[in-house]
Image (cartoon, coloured by chain):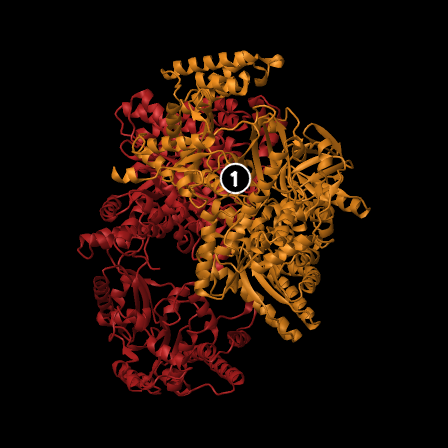
Chain colours: A orange, B red
Amino acid sequence: MDRQLSQQWVYQFGEGDGTMKALLGGKGAGIADMTRAGLPVPPGFTITTAACNATIAANGAFPTGLWEQIKVALSEMEQQVGKRFGDPANPLLVSVRSGAMFSMPGMMDTILNLGLNPATCDGLTLLTDNPRFAQDAYRRFVQLFGKIVLGVEGSRFEAILDEFKGHGPAARADTDLDAEELATITQRFKAVIQAQTGTLFPDDPYEQLNLAVGAVFNSWNGKRARDYRRVNKISNDLGTAVNVQAMVFGNMGNDSATGVAFTRDPATGEAQIFGEYLINAQGEDVVAGIRTPQPLSTLARVMPDAYAEFADIAHRIEAYYHDMQDLEFTIERGTLWMLQTRTGKRTAPAALKIAVDMVAEGLIDPATAVRRIDPHQLDQLLHPVIDPEAKRTNKALASGLAASPGAASGIIVLHPDEAEQRAKAGEQVILVRNETAPEDFHGMAVAQAIVTARGGKTSHAAVVARGMGKPCVAGCGALSINEAEQTIKIGTTTLRVGDWLSVDGTTGEIFAGQMPTVEPELNADFTTLMAWADEFRTIGVRANADVPHDAKVAREFGAEGIGLCRTEHMFFEGNRIDAVREMIVADSVEARRAALAKIEPLQHADFVGLFEVMDGLPVTIRTLDPPLHEFLPHAGPEITLLAHKLKITPRALRAKIETLREANPMLGLRGCRLGIMFPEITEVQARAIFTAAAECQARGIVVKPEVMIPLVSTLEEFHLQAELVREIAAKVMAQTGQTIDYTVGTMIELPRAALTADEIATEAEFFSFGTNDLTQTTLGLSRDDSGQFLPLYVDQLKLYPADPFQTIDQRGVGQLVEIGIERGRKTRPSLKVGICGEHGGDPDSVAFFIRAGMDYVSCSPYRVPIAKLAAAQTALGELARDK
Amino acid sequence: MDRQLSQQWVYQFGEGDGTMKALLGGKGAGIADMTRAGLPVPPGFTITTAACNATIAANGAFPTGLWEQIKVALSEMEQQVGKRFGDPANPLLVSVRSGAMFSMPGMMDTILNLGLNPATCDGLTLLTDNPRFAQDAYRRFVQLFGKIVLGVEGSRFEAILDEFKGHGPAARADTDLDAEELATITQRFKAVIQAQTGTLFPDDPYEQLNLAVGAVFNSWNGKRARDYRRVNKISNDLGTAVNVQAMVFGNMGNDSATGVAFTRDPATGEAQIFGEYLINAQGEDVVAGIRTPQPLSTLARVMPDAYAEFADIAHRIEAYYHDMQDLEFTIERGTLWMLQTRTGKRTAPAALKIAVDMVAEGLIDPATAVRRIDPHQLDQLLHPVIDPEAKRTNKALASGLAASPGAASGIIVLHPDEAEQRAKAGEQVILVRNETAPEDFHGMAVAQAIVTARGGKTSHAAVVARGMGKPCVAGCGALSINEAEQTIKIGTTTLRVGDWLSVDGTTGEIFAGQMPTVEPELNADFTTLMAWADEFRTIGVRANADVPHDAKVAREFGAEGIGLCRTEHMFFEGNRIDAVREMIVADSVEARRAALAKIEPLQHADFVGLFEVMDGLPVTIRTLDPPLHEFLPHAGPEITLLAHKLKITPRALRAKIETLREANPMLGLRGCRLGIMFPEITEVQARAIFTAAAECQARGIVVKPEVMIPLVSTLEEFHLQAELVREIAAKVMAQTGQTIDYTVGTMIELPRAALTADEIATEAEFFSFGTNDLTQTTLGLSRDDSGQFLPLYVDQLKLYPADPFQTIDQRGVGQLVEIGIERGRKTRPSLKVGICGEHGGDPDSVAFFIRAGMDYVSCSPYRVPIAKLAAAQTALGELARDK
């Protein structure tokens, strides 16, 4: 008893501060901050989370002292506002809001206008001279209170409202109801509440408040809130705070107004106040768009005093928070009240400009500027976008998955060969397919953008498009392709091959016709920011690049090496695929060697190109990885053609293709298993790498090849392949007289490899985590097939906190990454560790990889700046983004 | 120096004993044991592994004292044998053999007849009066010594031999060469050796011995031996011992002989000596089969004294080892020498009889009897085998994988429907397919045996066949099927549908025609042994059974419950597959519910049947697991038929089938993902389980249902499904008034589930490890596709110590099992943990599961005795089998 009496359950706004989130909740701490900053915030108080916990522990009974403290706080509020709670002559009305430490769905909604009863409602009518306003406020209060506090089903109130408004096209809006009707509705509401709960609707404002606070406390233990906390691993012991705040009204006449504003232009970042307002209106009227709001600049003329005060506050508030703010304000009878301030949302260019400007203004330091940019948003700056103006008139036909950012237009083609022909003839094409396969590579390479009907954000089309920096919309369910008629149908629109199509890979939208795009501009602000990021970050950033062109882009974006070169991507260039197919179809080692002999000089040339571009930087080259089946044609005519080229019967070729067919190719004959079954493949690739390295080195280029063996699950597999690579390297070095500084390492992309990393590290000189495959195997989840249920899992049921192919699953896959690094380094303390999966360019994942102790991340060239920024933010100790 | 001088590097046979394997090697310790047992073993000595290590450490120089100790030991040997090393009058010849602690390929081969030179060779000729014998012995010695000790390529000697023997059909055998030719050949060998090594072939026997011992030591560090040790995790520090033993000869005249014998009949187990011998012959002559050996019983007449001594030794030796022995002996001029004794290999029935008899005889105790039976071998007792007599005349057409044991004959059918029709008509059929799918179930159920051209030991055909206890030969590469002509080709033989075929699933052999089989007989010995096993084992043994018939078999074999009932296997019974397909094709929840309404009563009846059979024992029922695609037809006519039944167009059906097609179905929409996408499926299954349980319980049957959610990767998934099951259970209990004691648990079959077992165990009441899927995901290895490279991996390259789908991969998958159990029990100490993958019936894996702390293993009904025996053996602390 004594302890409880001495405990402070209630804090006036401003009594606490922003550091007290655990006790006051997020909202309460924020309001405390604003109040302390001297802003004109409607007064009020916060009831602590401790009070909530004590009440729950006592089965709903308030702890000793709580109610008394609430009444004391309320009377202070009355003095500040000059109104009295329950006073018909000048009634104080309050809002009651829940506010836990973390914002949480399932918690109690806001109750507005608490304090109204027949007498105070009459008083409000007299004060405002607006019976409709008063009756509507009362109606809203009874409805909210009935539903939220007293637990009456909301539909019962809606039914009564509908009765008055009527149905169908003739139905009236809420705003069409007059004061008398509203009063009748409120009576009906009360009757329903009495029937349902067996008690009269409480008229005593103190009783209203007592019940409302209890209801907020109680909602902390509601099923939805508990479920949410379980899923999000939030402790049940935190409890929720309750905020009680004086109501203010912008609709009390022409000396009242309401508006929203930003302290700087949220679209461009320009340093001037930007906003809109409405005279004699409520906040929701501005949003509802029934009346057209005025630009804020005109307020200076209409209410000069209020405007001056607001402009001053806007500057002060920005200076206080050191960031651009999004403000809500109400002017009640000439008095300005700040209802909310929060960090303002802004476009990517605005974010960049504001951050760099604020450093120049001395408002923030470069570290803060770096923290302030959302790396996800940075993506917008690196790719063209469709002109927003054009989107207003030409609506999207459909949306698919935003699989690779950027926007482009082109004419529709359905086949990669046609794409190549038309592109050669100077046409811009967009390749539209059900899904893509490695054999479509040449068509993808020349297309402006790629659209697929199937597949997720990590499907073949998506991965390749991102690598090439091309827009891609994947998994567009509304798209169907009719090859026979050479048409496509998107939603209800049918288009022909040759028609123009526009694609926005940033949003996933697809448009008919040719839409204008806005090119990205990497201005001085961008360069400044990236230089700051480079200063702060502690992890290396490399790029995944397969061909010299991509490597060049990567280097321009500041990549510090190539973390993954997928040699097989080179297989599709020009007509070398024929030799590759010949190799696959070969029935003997000799025949395979003959085919490989044709491939070797081409691979040699590829590697020369890469080493030239990456002069002085490391280049990690992975030996052949994908299932051989992927390289073979599947359609009848192509099979016939290939059989002819290979001088075998189509029947024999079809049989060979059938032999190579796998039930689960992702878990089949691929990765190092290929090199173990057919050592001559690894041999030829190794020779191409080392002869290229020797040639370049002889020309004065600094080469740092790192040969990487994929899909290793045991030390033995690695040993066999690494030994072969080292043998070839020694031979080439002996032949050329060049001593090449190289390493042989492995991908860690199977759970077993991570679990036995201590063994594998006895021979592997570096690890690169292949988190795409590691995610697939750890979760038992095919990235190609998960599109059927992943949206349900992630968006609706929240069974995964995020798409595990975009953001690494820290609890599961992350454990294996940590285990792999720890065990690998235990055996070989100097082990270099990186990651080359899709997650390498995901900001949240980058933060995890840094904590896990990686030396570098590797991502697609266009994500290098994003990874760098994320790395800098992690190094700076926290991410600026709201979570 | 002092320390080394005082060290004992050499042990006379009998100076050490069987416990000194680390110092004397396995072979040396064994010989020591035999000598101590008083057997007439040719004398000799063992040079220790410590001497090997010291020599290696000194770069090949023998440690101080070693050579002197060897010479002392040799002179003791001379005294024992009555011959002298290098004495032309009566030369002592010795064999030199390596002998490490573990037997190891890549170590030095045996050198025989060391001590021969021109002088002693002449002496041998005089002594034996057999110049050819002496010259051949010399020739062999020079060849072996040249190759093994001096490192001359073996092919050089072969070439010279070939020169003398000639080529082609007219070529002579080694035995056709006469003494003179052999002498010439030996000269030629010496010349080659001199040319290759630059030194004369050593004539001094001491020099020969010195070099031979050094070569054995050196071979410990050879590449092949090092590779083998690395793969098998054998320390490089162990070193090898060297055994030097006096040569004895059974080919010194008619008072000499050589033979092999078992102390009991290895085929039947009958307690009488069983063996064969040859007069005036060498050991290899018995094996070579040029002369026909005589039954040992006749030796009593020919050499009564030697026979009496041998019979006495055989009894003593068996009594000494407490086990049936496989003996090799030589009689040199009337003196009996025991060359080898080792535990005798025996058939399964013999093993059983010997073990039970020996307990009766007081030779061993029941624990030893239980330890003594190889659980793998037990399998032979539980299934019919092809009459061994019949195999002599009718050779197998080809061999595939021994996928499910047992033997059967039947007429060939290619289609499950035809199998069903013919079986109904009373015919015995064998179903021959490229591979099987769930839709073939009805045909498999009526077949005597199943043969497939593709797929491994854990393919669908293999798993289903084992579950049903039917023979299956899978992945028979020599088999090709011609559906159009209704023929099959096996190797070079073409057979027609309707022809007889015989299948031995224990060996993998396939025979043309109808072969007689021998039925298994579970005699009193078997019952006795299983009772002993039940007494010793500490882990529960359940069975995987899907239908009442299998459950009945399981119970008869002593299963203590059902560890896995795959509800989907019931889907193929009768014509209920139509309703299942209707459910799958349904486009709305309503349509799906309508189809499910047809399935529910059938599933209810299934569960009633299971509960009846398993009265009093737990029954674990898994909710729907396989990809839906598996249930749909794929051939044109079947699609048309089904479309007609479902009243949709074939085109629409084909489109639906295409929609459900997955790139990697193993990682796709299956397991609990199905129940989460379509909760109505789980709902109906749960209702069928609980209404069946309630009905049975009302009739006095004791039901213990355990509902198991498959393929869970997060607690959230489990929570959703378990909550649904519990809701339905509560409803059924309320409706029926029956309180059912049930639990809801999960399969742990994804790495993520094992890694987050602590979370999952907050709600899951039991875990059952699905090690099939866990192996697939941990190793990134599809069991359906790995057949292409697994033989290379396991048999040739030893990249995995065993097929990971048969014997659990302890280093990788095993870690996840241990992590899962440890973390699960940390959250819920009472957590019941079992395993229901294929590994549940594998003896090595069972031992691991016991060590890992599991409560039970569950395997196919026919493997229950095997699992029980393995469990008893593990409990007894060691496995009796050689490793």
Quadrant of the frame with the N terminus of chain B: bottom left
The quadrant holding residue A299 is top right
Chain containing the residue with disc 1: A
Dot 1: element: loop
Q: Which of A447 and B476 is in front in this view?
A: A447
Placement of A220 over or under A702, stated as above or below: above
Does residue A844 appear in the picture of this structure? yes
Q: Position of residue A15 (x, y in %)?
A: 42, 41
- What kind of residue is marked 1? Leu
Where does residue B91 sit, x and y in percent of width and height?
Answer: 34, 84
Left-right relation of A840 to B601:
right
User: For this rendering, which residue is in front, A228 or A45?
Assistant: A45
Please say if B442 is above or below B644.
Answer: below
Residue A475 occupies quadrant: top right
Q: Is residue A813 above or below residue A155?
A: below
User: Is residue A881 or residue A404 the one in the foreground?
Assistant: A881
